[in-house]
Image (tube, rainbow, N blue to C red):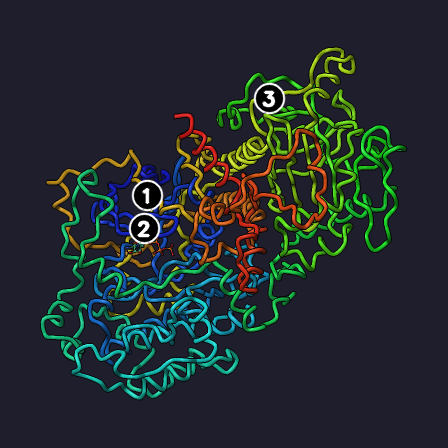
């Protein structure tokens, strides 16, 4: 046995050539197999750091698993996955090279397809969909962009990143999958059942097929509004027209085959239960001449077709000639060494104009917000317990809560309940003298955390080590985070004396009632302060020692020695919002507000320096100060902690993420009827697939790649603004010599598939090897899935709203009041109450940050109420992003 053939494939085995395109998380390169230059692949390169940062792990995993599953049938209509491998930086998927380019490009070139071409492509799509569905897979994002063409012009469906299985109980694609749990797809092709019932079935793919048939005939999809919401409205209202003026490109042919109209009409049925099935579709008059069993005919490539078919293309003769030549991509010189290729090709003016005209539909995977908003506007119930994949919507907002979030909320709720039930105490040691008067039952008293209640408070964080003074606090190098995973207790990042005042939401009456949650703004803060002024004013309170640790825990201790610690909140909690209201650390004045979504608000103010020095120097601490890291603001420190956690997670995710070397499983000829069917057809599609290499047994260390140095990680911008990442080919891929490369033909000549008997011998690895590889493959998948889950757990269900275009700075500018910032006196208390507290407005915050979850709530509520006013809280897209911006600002200030 040739041992070299068993070695796992690596990027070094391929010569990476030009870029074929790039998607949201990958760049695809043409690549030639060094062992056999006749084998040409399209290799999809996904940067590990990027897919983790952009939370695409799930889609990559689903895509790989689905393609593995579908490759087994060797169906010509599927882009086949041959190998997956990885190195420290990237994942690699070696795929069928679709040299004919995208179907959408062909459609744009010709404006629309004639009846014969339309029918031919439809037949190939029907055949492929039948196969996909027979394997229990729903594509969920079918559209012309996701259909490629091989060298002969046969369709190949690709992009299975949104796929789902019809069988929830035995899901080889995605453990986490719930058929109706997620919004995926592209607005123009999304089905009414997904919009109306959050349900996706195989019939949803048929809906998309109907949209495509219409598009083949007319040139543009049937449902396209000015924005996604209008597109959705058109879809559920079945608002489309066959008006010829929309598609009559050259005025030469305005008639549409009524059989196409009839076919589309039977597909575009709102109720998926009565929508036509694929089996019924095949019996329609439009296909009456077609023998569905004649796979050879169905799978004839359009570039090799009989002239009669091409003659009927409704385009000028020159274009017909062009079509006969095949796609222009085939005419390009393709053997250019990679170093000579300009990777980011600038679009020419004409191309830009064309691109504008042929607007590509936007993918809306993850972009659920428009659907949520659309449903809300239409008054469609949001609370489908069964359709939210176990997620529940919070009653006030309709925003989904994952079970984990719900559990957290319940835990915090319980803590809040306990806190409310505690006897009310005053601030600090002198609880008797400062005990607040009991409140009416309808307006329970705010809870102040006195030392006497210390033991009753839920302990969130373990006691930290003795504080280690930090002279100055430059951001810790990330390497320290990743190279020091030892279980030593996290270091405190900052520690200082504060006064803390804690208000559970439901404890303060109408102003903070959950029903008026959307009113959180300066007025509300003013109101709270006015209401609790007496407590906030209390100067007899003994300060607490507040600590934020590297692990992101915010905790205070009642005694200045730092023992007896009470957890407040975790800064990585996506439900935590931080408001910096007039908080001037240098002057030790004002107060910082933290809010746990719908649970509590904490007012934190700094103890005056004189108090601190008394505490530290005046004997309480025996002269040694537990105060550390004077030079960094609390707010900055929060963000730094959060950033460190993000970085840590990213690092661990990158370390854990891998795809196993190996290739798609291949089945024995005859095992699967489809395969037999296709292998014995007269067409050459079986030969169009390169021969897979035998399954390699992955080396143990390949399961987990070595840790990735921080330098490979991209900067951490807000997801929304992240430009598509460019994945450069691996350095190991040496450029091919021009002379040598010329020996490769422009259109690849493929070997036979391993499933076909070419020379009487079958190249196949032993079942044992396959099993081992498969097992390790599964392990790797599980590892990457747990990484995925880890990240997705924190992902807000609703994605950034499409209308959110302004930067956080712009938004801050927008909310900034014309009034000059009011400085709070240097005491832990706000200024004495004015006679009319309502008039005493606080200036908008300097560093007000609202986490993305809060943003979604506010954004949804504000937009639905049409009340986007200057005094509404404006959010950033996340604390990390805010931190980065803040850091950039600091950097530029320093410069
Ligand atoms: N097998 C292939 N053969 C030839 N070209 C390909 C192949 N796969 C992808 N491409 C090209 O590379 C581009 C990027 O493909 P990729 O699958 O990464 O992203 P996408 O599906 O377009 O985007 P996204 O994954 O964000 O939906 C495609 O638009 C296509 O032009």
- Residue toward you, 127 or 885: 885
Say which residue appears at 44% left-offset and 60% top-offset: 364
- Residue toward you, 596 or 161: 596
Q: Which of disc 1 and disc 3 is earlier in sequence? A: 3
Q: Nearer the viewer, mark 3 or mark 1?
A: 3
Categorize mark 1 by other alpha carbons within 10 Å: few (<14), some (14-19), many (20+).
some
Say which residue appears at 22% left-offset and 72% top-offset: 111
Q: Which mark is residue 22?
A: 2
Q: Is residue 140 left or right of residue 681?
A: right
Position of residue 69 measured from the top left corner of the image (x, y, whole percent): 44, 58
Figure check: 592 above or below 158: above
Q: Quadrant of residue 461?
A: top right
Q: Quadrant of residue 37?
A: top left
Looking at the figure, which quarter contains the C terminus? top left
Mark 3 lies on residue: 629
- Residue toward you, 512 or 608: 608
Q: Kindly indicate whether the residue at mark 2 contacts the one at mark 1 (C-beta within 8 angstroms).
A: yes
Q: Nearer the viewer, mark 3 or mark 2?
A: 3
Position of residue 377 measured from the top left corner of the image (x, y, whole percent): 54, 70
For mark 2, give the secondary structure.
strand
Q: Residue furthest top?
A: 623
For mark 3, give the secondary structure.
loop
Disc 1 CB within 8 Å of nearest ligand 1 atom: no
Q: CA distance from mark 3 to mark 2?
A: 45 Å
Mark 1 lies on residue: 726
């Amino acid at each position: 046995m040739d041992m070299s053939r068993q070695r796992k494939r690596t990027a070094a085995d391929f010569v990476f050539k030009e870029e074929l395109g790039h998607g949201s998380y990958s760049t695809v390169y043409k690549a030639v197999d060094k062992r056999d230059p006749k084998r040409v692949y399209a290799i999809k390169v996904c940067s590990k750091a990027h897919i983790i940062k952009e939370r695409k792990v799930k889609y990559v995993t689903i895509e790989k698993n689905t393609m593995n599953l579908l490759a087994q049938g060797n169906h010509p209509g599927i882009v086949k996955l041959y190998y997956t491998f990885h190195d420290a930086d990237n994942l690699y998927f070696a795929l069928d090279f679709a040299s004919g380019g995208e179907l959408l490009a062909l459609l744009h070139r010709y404006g629309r397809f004639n009846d014969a071409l339309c029918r031919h492509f439809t037949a190939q799509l029907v055949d492929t969909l039948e196969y996909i569905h027979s394997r229990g897979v729903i594509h969920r994002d079918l559209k012309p962009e996701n259909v490629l063409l091989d060298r002969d012009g046969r369709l190949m469906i690709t992009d299975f990143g949104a796929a789902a299985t019809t069988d929830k109980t035995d899901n080889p694609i995605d453990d986490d999958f719930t058929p109706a749990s997620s919004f995926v797809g592209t607005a123009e092709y999304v089905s009414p059942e997904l919009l109306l019932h959050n349900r996706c079935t195989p019939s949803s793919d048929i809906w998309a097929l109907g949209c495509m048939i219409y598009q083949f005939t007319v040139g543009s999809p049937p449902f396209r509004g000015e924005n996604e919401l209008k597109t959705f409205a058109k879809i559920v209202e079945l608002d489309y027209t066959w008006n010829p003026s929309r598609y009559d490109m050259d005025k030469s042919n305005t008639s549409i085959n009524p059989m196409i109209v009839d076919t589309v009409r039977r597909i575009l049925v709102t109720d998926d239960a009565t929508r036509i099935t694929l089996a019924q579709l095949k019996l329609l008059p439009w296909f009456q001449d077609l023998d569905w069993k004649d796979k050879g005919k169905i799978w004839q490539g359009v570039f090799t077709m009989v002239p009669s078919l091409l003659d009927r293309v409704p385009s000028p003769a020159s274009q017909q000639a062009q079509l006969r030549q095949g796609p222009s991509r085939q005419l390009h010189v393709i053997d250019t060494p990679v170093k000579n290729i300009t990777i980011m090709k600038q679009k020419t003016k004409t191309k830009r104009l064309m691109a504008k005209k042929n607007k590509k539909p936007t993918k809306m995977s993850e972009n659920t917000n428009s659907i949520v908003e659309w449903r809300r506007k239409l008054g469609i119930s949001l609370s489908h317990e069964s359709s939210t994949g176990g997620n529940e919507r919070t009653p006030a907002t309709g925003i989904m809560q994952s079970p984990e979030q719900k559990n957290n909320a319940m835990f915090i709720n319980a803590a809040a309940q306990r806190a409310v039930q505690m006897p009310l105490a005053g601030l600090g040691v002198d609880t008797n003298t400062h005990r607040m008067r009991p409140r009416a039952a309808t307006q329970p008293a705010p809870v102040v955390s006195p030392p006497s209640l210390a033991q009753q408070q839920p302990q969130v964080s373990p006691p930290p080590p003795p504080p280690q003074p930090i002279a100055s606090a430059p951001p810790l190098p990330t390497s320290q985070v990743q190279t020091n995973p030892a279980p030593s207790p996290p270091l405190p990042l900052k520690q200082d004396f504060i006064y803390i005042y804690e208000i559970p939401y439901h404890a303060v009456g109408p102003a903070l009632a959950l029903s008026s949650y959307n009113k959180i703004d300066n007025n509300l803060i003013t109101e709270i302060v006015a209401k609790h002024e007496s407590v906030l004013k209390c100067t007899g309170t003994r300060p607490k020692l507040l600590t934020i640790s590297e692990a992101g825990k915010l905790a205070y201790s009642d005694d200045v020695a730092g023992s007896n610690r009470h957890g407040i909140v975790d800064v990585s909690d996506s439900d935590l919002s931080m408001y910096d209201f007039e908080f001037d650390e240098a002057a030790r004045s004002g107060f910082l507000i933290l809010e746990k979504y719908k649970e509590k608000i904490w007012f934190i103010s700094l103890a005056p320096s004189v108090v601190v020095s008394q505490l530290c120097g005046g004997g309480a601490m025996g002269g040694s100060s537990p105060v550390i890291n004077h030079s960094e603001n609390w707010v900055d420190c929060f963000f730094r902690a959060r950033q460190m956690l993000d970085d840590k997670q990213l690092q661990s995710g990158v370390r854990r993420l891998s795809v196993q070397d190996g290739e798609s499983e291949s089945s024995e000829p005859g095992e699967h009827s489809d395969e037999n069917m296709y292998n014995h057809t007269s067409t050459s599609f079986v030969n169009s697939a390169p021969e897979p290499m035998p399954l390699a047994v992955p080396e143990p260390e390949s399961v987990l790649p070595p840790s990735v140095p921080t330098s490979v990680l991209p900067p951490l911008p807000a997801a929304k603004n992240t430009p598509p990442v460019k994945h450069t080919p691996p350095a190991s891929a040496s450029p091919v010599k021009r002379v040598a490369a010329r020996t490769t033909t422009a259109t690849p000549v493929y070997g036979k598939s391993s499933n076909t008997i070419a020379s009487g011998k079958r190249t196949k690895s032993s079942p044992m090897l396959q099993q081992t590889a498969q097992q390790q493959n599964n392990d790797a998948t599980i590892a990457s899935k747990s990484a995925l889950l880890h990240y997705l757990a924190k992902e807000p269900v609703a994605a950034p709203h499409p209308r959110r275009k302004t930067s956080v700075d712009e938004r801050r500018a927008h909310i900034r009041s014309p009034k000059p910032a009011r400085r709070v006196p240097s005491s832990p208390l706000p200024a004495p109450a004015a006679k009319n507290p309502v008039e005493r407005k606080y200036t908008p915050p300097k560093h007000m940050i609202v986490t993305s979850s809060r943003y979604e709530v506010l954004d949804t509520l504000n937009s639905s109420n049409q009340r986007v006013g200057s005094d509404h809280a404006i959010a950033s897209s996340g604390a990390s992003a805010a931190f980065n911006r803040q850091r950039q600002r600091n950097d530029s200030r320093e410069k």
